[in-house]
Amino acid sequence: MRFAPALMLFLALALLLPAPPASAADSALSADGRWRAELVAPDRLAITAADTGALARVFEGVARDGTPSRFEGVYVDPTRRHFIVPLLDAPEYWLIATDPDAPPVYEGFVHSREAGMIEALPSSQGLFARERVPVEHILTRLRFSDDFREMYALTPDGRLRITVNLYVDREIARESLE
């Protein structure tokens, strides 16, 4: 039992120190447990059925402007039923719906959003509908508020901390870390 004091000290420190922040995930399970999103290559995201492993959809890392990109990681937002996938080489993140009844996503110009009067063609809708969200900075090392209202990220050079409100999909704060 000569290791008992060392073990007790280790356990005490583990309980007293704050948990390290979550790191970028290579895979995430949807909030309902039905779908798994996994980075199968730096620029390729595969979504499979969690129970059978059957491939359901593959996304290539290409930004809205055509820039090839790697993915920073894949995260799950349990409150709005989608995966959050930031691009590592373009200032953009994706919201990929895990809800079969997800509303249409319009990537082009929408003349009117008045009910029954929408004058646009949806780029996707329903299960795995992808919404591309442009931001001012490339986002890395993501963290989320407990209620998933806000996403916190650093710029790749670590000089800025960015806060994005996930309900309006906009940067709402920028803090210099220098």
Image: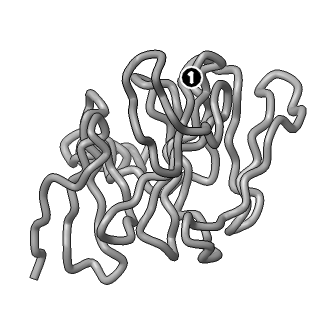
Residue 147: percent from the left, percent from the top?
Answer: 27, 27
- What colouring style does the render use? one colour
Give SS at disc 1.
loop
The image shows residue 136, relative to residue 78, as above or below, that is below
Q: Quadrant of the N terminus?
A: top left
Residue drawn at point x = 38 percent, y = 62 percent: 141
Q: Disc 1 designates what residue?
A: 102
The image shows residue 132, relative to residue 160, as above or below, that is above
On screen, residue 5 versus residue 17, left or right, reads right
Residue drawn at point x = 54 percent, y = 38 percent: 120
Residue drawn at point x = 60 percent, y = 21 percent: 99
Q: Amino acid at mark 1?
A: Ala
On screen, residue 36 versus residue 91, left or right, reads right
On screen, residue 124 versus residue 161, left or right, reads right
The image shows residue 115, relative to residue 29, as above or below, that is above
Residue drawn at point x = 37 percent, y = 55 percent: 142
* Count of marks placed on residues: 1
Q: Is residue 147 visible?
A: yes
Residue 154: percent from the left, percent from the top?
Answer: 29, 67
